[in-house]
Amino acid sequence: MVVSAMPYPSYSIVIPAYNEAARIGHALQTVVACIRARGWSAEVVVVDDGSRDQTAHLVRAFAQDHPEVRLLQNPGNHGKGYSVRNGVLHSFGEVVLFTDADLSAPIEEADGLFAAIAAGADIAIGSRWLERARQTIRQPLYRQFFGRCFNGVTRFIMGLPYADTQCGFKAFTRTAAQIVFQLQTIERWGFDPEILFIARKRGYRIEEVPVSWAHDERTRISYLKDGLRMLQDIAIVRWNALLGRYSKQVERISRAGLAK
C-alpha cells in the first residue's frame, strides 16, 4: 500500500493519466500552484493507467520536489473508470475530486464544487451546460451534437436529471466516495453515469455546479466507438440494478488501513 507523506489532507485531487507525458507536467504545476495559492490542505494522486510513454517517470520526478503529489500505477491499462476508482479509493482526503489531465475545467473551478459540499451536498458535479457562456473553447459542433444526444439518452434510460453527466470534474465527501466507488463496475468511459446512478440510488444529495470549460482537441474519446460502448454500459448498469448489486452493504475504508 502507498504510505501518505503528510497528515490526512482536507482534499484529494485524483488525476487519471494514460500516455500524458505531453500534458502531465503542466497539469501538476498548475494544480500544485493553485493548492499553495489557496492554502488548501491537499494531496494530488496521479493514477497511471499503464502508460507506454514517460508519464510515470515525469510524475515521480515532479513528486520528489512537491510532497503534495504521489503516483499510483494500475496493473496494466484498464480505462479511465478503473483509474478514477483506484485513485479515489486510495485517497486520504475528506473531500475527493477527480479531474482530467488536460484541465479542461480549470482547477480553480474546484472552489465551486468544494463550496457545494461545504453547504451540505454529498457530491458536486461540474456542468458545462448550465451556463454555456462559460465554455471558453467549445467543442466542434459534431461533438456537441453527439455529446448532447448521449446525455439525453442517458438521462432518459437511467433517470438522471442532470444537464451534464459526462463532465470529468466531480467531487465527493469521503463517505460518499467510498460507498459509490466500491460499487462501481464500469471501468472505461461509461463510468460517469454509473456513479451518478449509484449515488442517487443510495440517497446521496448531488448538486450540479456550472464550471468554465475549454475543449482540448487532443481528447481521445471517439463518439462512434466509445459512444456505442457507453450504450452497452448503460445496459449493464440497468442489469446490475435489477440484480441488486448497487444495494448491497459496503464497508468504509479506513485511512489507517490504506497507510499500511
Image (cartoon, rainbow, N blue to C red):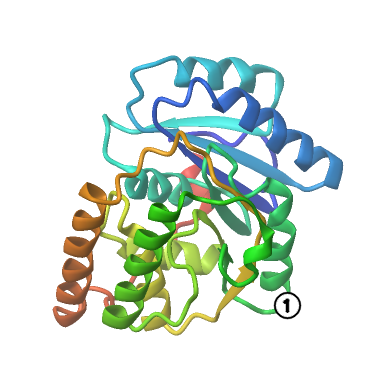
The quadrant in which the N terminus is found is top left
Left or right: residue 108 compared with residue 37: left
Q: Position of residue 243 (x, y in %)?
A: 14, 78
Q: Quadrant of residue 233?
A: bottom left
Q: Is residue 108 visible?
A: yes
Q: Nearer the viewer, residue 55 or 218?
A: 218
For image coordinates 49% across by 15% down, the residue present is: 57
Visible residue check, residue 251: no
Question: In the rendering, at what x and y percent does residue 174 appear?
Answer: 55, 62
Residue occupied by mark 1: 119
Q: Position of 122 compared to 204: left or right? A: right
Amino acid under disc 1: Ala
Q: How many marks?
A: 1
Residue 181 picture quarter: bottom left
Q: Residue at x 82, y 38 (%)?
A: 36
Q: Position of residue 132 (x, y in %)?
A: 62, 65
Residue 44, quarter of the rendered image: top right
- Residue that sits furthest to the front in the current view: 141
Q: Position of residue 47 (x, y in %)?
A: 45, 35
- 181 vs 252, nearest the viewer: 181
Left or right: where 25 falls relative to 196: right
Question: What residue appears at the point 54 percent right and 81 percent down from the top-left corner?
Answer: 205
Q: Residues within 10 Å of mark 1 (few under 14, many from 20)?
A: few
- The one nearer the camera, 132 or 31, is 132
Relative to 58, say whether 248 is above or below.
below
Q: Secondary structure at mark 1?
A: loop
